[in-house]
Image: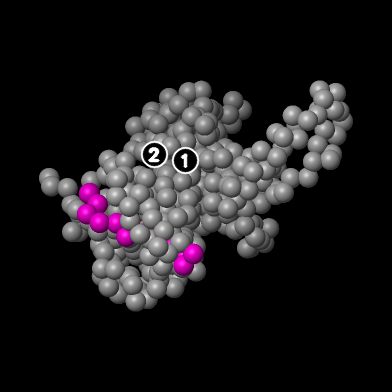
Amino acid sequence: MTRKSLKIAVIGATGLVGQVLIKELEKGGFNFEVDDIIPYASGLSEGKLINFRGEKIGIKSLKGKNIENVDIAFFCADEEVSKQFAKKFIDKGVVVIDNSSAFRLDAGIPLVVPEVNADDIGDAMLIANPNCSTIQLVVALSPLIKFGIKRVFVTTYQAISGAGRDALSSFIEEWEDMWDWIENKSLVELVSEHPYADFVPPAHFSNVVPQIGNIIQGDLYKEEYKIIHETRKILNMPDLNIHATAVRVPVINAHSESVFVEFVTVPSLEDVKDTLSRSEGIEIIGPYPTPVAISGKRKVYIGRIRQELDEPNIYHLFVVADNLRKGAATNALQIAEIIAERF
């Protein structure tokens, strides 16, 4: 079969997800070629250049009058940009794959993880790319539905890169400041009762913080709300009993999740492992995956698969994925592979 050649727009080309999406396109391995790529970013970046396969391409500022006729537009900016410009692209006949939270829970807008619900795309002109932590969770849960999922608890350990480019830059600067501080302390001072008493980090990302986003419903922070409601929509399980705690941790890249699944049935450990290992997009790693080990990779990685001794219908999984790739850019490109069949 001849690989389709597409004209692509990337909105938010200078952000972390936009940059990774462009790198993933350069790396290839998808079922379409890129005939042309048009990068868009804020006015501050207009005229700057990006490199794509040895060619320097100028960045455009997104305005109503300079929307190009492309095949697919990847929105990698915030939800306000998507709300303002997505329809303008669609009106030109462009398929929009949106990585923001603008449309994810809207009725009639497919929210897609290709390994789970590719058929939901249909002939839609706007497809929402789910939240990063939701994507890896549903890839892990979907194969296990056949055992009858009674309830799910998930605690996330989310990397700083998930908070964006500015947060990641601040985090790296912060740790450089901390190591400078440590190098100027004696061993006695470092093991004292309050070793960091006189060190005030410039940001709270040097901590483990059980808050991502603002309170959005009851006691749920925004990230937890996303995980719960997006998971229900993607799995087509609107009444799924699911609970989430989202935590930002001092890791540069790749999100981890501790997942507790209670089944209606009592599957054997061998059946659970076999089911997961045979599922698309999953790789089992023993004894466990880590952010360092899987950063830069495209799949969802699972380890520490274990069964409760006293309650054998309960299983624990440790799920890790690169939040900028499978959690964002790569998932969007997998959606594009399905869209490419239209052209």
Q: Residue at x 74, y 29 (%)?
A: 183
Q: Is residue 22 left or right of residue 79?
A: left
Residue 171, by quadrant, is: top right
Quarter of the rendering containing residue 301? top left
Looking at the rendering, the stretch of residues picked out in magenta corresponds to: 32-44
SS majority, magenta: strand
Given residues 88 and 51, the one toward you in this image is: 51
Q: Give the answer, above or below, for where 217 lies relative to 187.
A: below
Residue type at tag 1: Asp
**Tag 2 or tag 1, which sits nearer the N-term?**
2
The front one of 335 and 276 is 335
Quarter of the image where the N terminus is located: top left
Can you say which quadrant of the picture contains the C terminus? bottom left
- Tell me residue 128's x, y (percent): 40, 60
Residue type (three-letter) at the residue carrying disc 2: Arg
Residue located beneath label 1 in the image: 322
Can residue 135 be seen in this snapshot?
Answer: no
Asked if residue 67 shows in the view, the reply is yes
Label 1: how many Cα within 10 Å (few below 14, some 14–19, many 20+): many
Q: Nearer the viewer, residue 252 or 288?
A: 252
Q: Which residue is mark 2?
A: 298
Residue sitting at 84 percent across and 39 percent down? Answer: 197
Tell me whether the residue at label 1 lies in contact with that at label 2, contact meaning CB atoms closer than 8 angstroms: yes
Residue 336 x %, y %: 29, 53
Residue 216, position in %: x, y?
A: 63, 63
Query: Residue sitting at 35 percent across and 49 percent down?
Result: 51
The correct choice, above or below, for 15 with respect to 305 in the image is below
Residue 187: x, y in percent?
81, 23
**Scheme of colours in the image:** one colour
| Side (left or right) of 74 relative to 343 | right
